[in-house]
Image (cartoon, grey):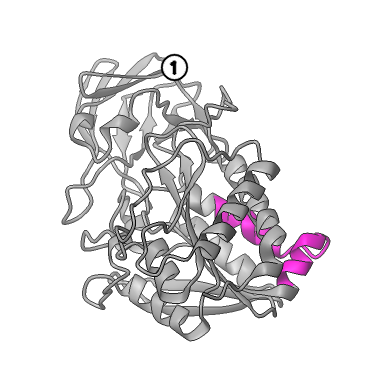
């Protein structure tokens, strides 16, 4: 068979430059109207039993070039199980060397979670009688901003992910969180639903997800820099979600992401907001400590630099919600690589581990739920 590469499908991203024997040169395509790029997802056909060298030649100028050293690409024959394959990075070129067993295989930056998969999730969750489903509005491409509400308690908990569409581990995390919250046999979930009302937006950037973007929506806007002043023209996704938050209030919020460079799971908080209160920070610290205790996949030693007093970026959701509502707000970052403290040589950080971490995150919430809401 003739070798062929395509990304003309939901969430796909690659450009074929040249095929020379078993060497295939490729480029990642920039987000529309943006300079961001790093996410790739493509299909290779015709290579069964043949050693091939896939070279992504424009990695040096990608959004996060420090994410490539030590990174291993994901490959799947069935788009269900994704394994890590031999990958190297040198001179700005990411090289994937593999001998596929099948004539049709897929490669991705991380296990994909397409909009078709998202629709399956929405259909399953919305059919549960314990869940209230609504669309909060539409994106610039005309997709719905899907929203779930469940629980009857006074504590208002918001969980949302995929502001950056290439960070697909956030969707796998959402699957795990929803599975746990809807498990009537789980006593933690039953008590959480009695103490809190959960507001869940599993994909805040449907347009970028379908288009195969790394970081932006349909018109190249980084949604996690819009929370101070969202608009229908630039960021309707944030505007509609924030408007709903203004109606419900927010006591606890988690924004779920992925990090390209740091090989660990960690949190980023709201230090540096103008109204910073030590009691608010103490509850955040207690939550992080509980998560460390509950999950060997979480740690607090590695992470982002903490903002100084008054230096928080209020255009980002975590700082905005902590300032706007006095919420215990946080950004969860999961790795594209692996958790180096507990590595998995076959799958690295994976969908299953993302789902399981979500369960631990909810267990940690249960440990502090009786002290919410925080009142400044």
Give percent across and percent down for residue 150.
65, 75
Disc 1 is placed on an element classified as loop
Furthest-bottom residue in this view? 247
Give percent across and percent down for residue 168.
45, 48
Q: Which quadrant of the figure has residue 370?
A: bottom right
From this view, report whether residue 362 is shown above or below residue 294: below
Q: Is residue 175 magenta?
A: yes
Tell me which residue sits at (26%, 74%) in the image. 229
Question: Which is the main secondary structure of the residues drawn in magenta?
Answer: helix
Q: Nearer the viewer, residue 312 or 22?
A: 312
Tell me which residue sits at (16%, 56%) in the image. 33
Q: Nearer the viewer, residue 216 or 52?
A: 216
Name the residue that disc number 1 marks: 99
Q: Is residue 353 magenta?
A: no
Looking at the figure, which quarter contains the N terminus?
top left
Q: Is residue 255 visible?
A: no
Tell me which residue sits at (57%, 45%) in the image. 354
From this view, report whether residue 184 is shown above or below residue 168: below
Question: Which span of residues is magenta-colored?
Answer: 173-193
């Amino acid at each position: 068979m003739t070798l062929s590469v395509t990304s003309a499908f939901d969430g796909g991203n690659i450009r074929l430059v040249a095929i020379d024997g078993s060497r295939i040169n490729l480029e990642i395509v920039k987000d529309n109207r943006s300079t961001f790029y790093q996410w790739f997802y493509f299909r290779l056909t015709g290579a069964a039993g043949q050693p091939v060298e896939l070279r992504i030649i424009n990695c040096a100028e990608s959004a996060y070039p420090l994410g490539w050293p030590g990174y291993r690409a994901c490959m799947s024959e069935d788009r269900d199980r994704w394994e890590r394959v031999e990958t190297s990075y040198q001179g700005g070129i990411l090289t994937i060397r593999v001998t596929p067993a099948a004539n049709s295989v897929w490669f991705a930056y991380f296990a994909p979670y397409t909009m078709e998969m998202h629709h399956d999730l929405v259909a399953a969750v919305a059919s549960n009688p314990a869940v209230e489903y609504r669309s909060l509005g539409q994106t610039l491409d005309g997709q719905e901003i899907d929203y779930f509400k469940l629980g009857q308690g006074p504590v208002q908990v918001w969980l949302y992910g995929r502001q950056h569409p290439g960070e697909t581990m956030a969707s796998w995390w959402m699957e795990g969180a929803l599975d746990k919250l809807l498990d009537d046999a789980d006593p933690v979930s039953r008590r959480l639903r009695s103490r809190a009302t959960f507001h869940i937006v599993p994909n805040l950037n449907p347009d970028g997800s379908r288009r195969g973007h790394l970081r932006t929506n349909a018109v190249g806007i980084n949604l996690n820099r819009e929370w101070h002043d969202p608009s229908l023209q630039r960021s309707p996704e944030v505007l509609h979600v924030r408007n709903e938050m203004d109606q419900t209030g927010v006591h606890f919020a988690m924004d779920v992401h992925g990090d390209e460079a740091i090989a660990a799971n960690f949190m980023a908080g709201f230090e540096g907001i103008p109204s910073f209160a030590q009691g608010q920070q103490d509850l955040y610290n207690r939550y992080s400590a509980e998560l460390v205790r509950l999950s060997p996949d979480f740690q607090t030693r590695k992470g982002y630099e903490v903002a100084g007093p008054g230096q928080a970026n209020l255009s980002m959701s975590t700082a905005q919600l902590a300032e706007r509502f006095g919420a215990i707000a946080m950004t969860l970052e999961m790795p594209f690589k692996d958790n180096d403290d507990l590595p998995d040589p076959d799958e690295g950080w994976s969908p299953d581990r993302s789902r399981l971490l979500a369960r631990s995150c909810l267990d940690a919430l249960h440990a502090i739920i009786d002290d919410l809401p925080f009142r400044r």
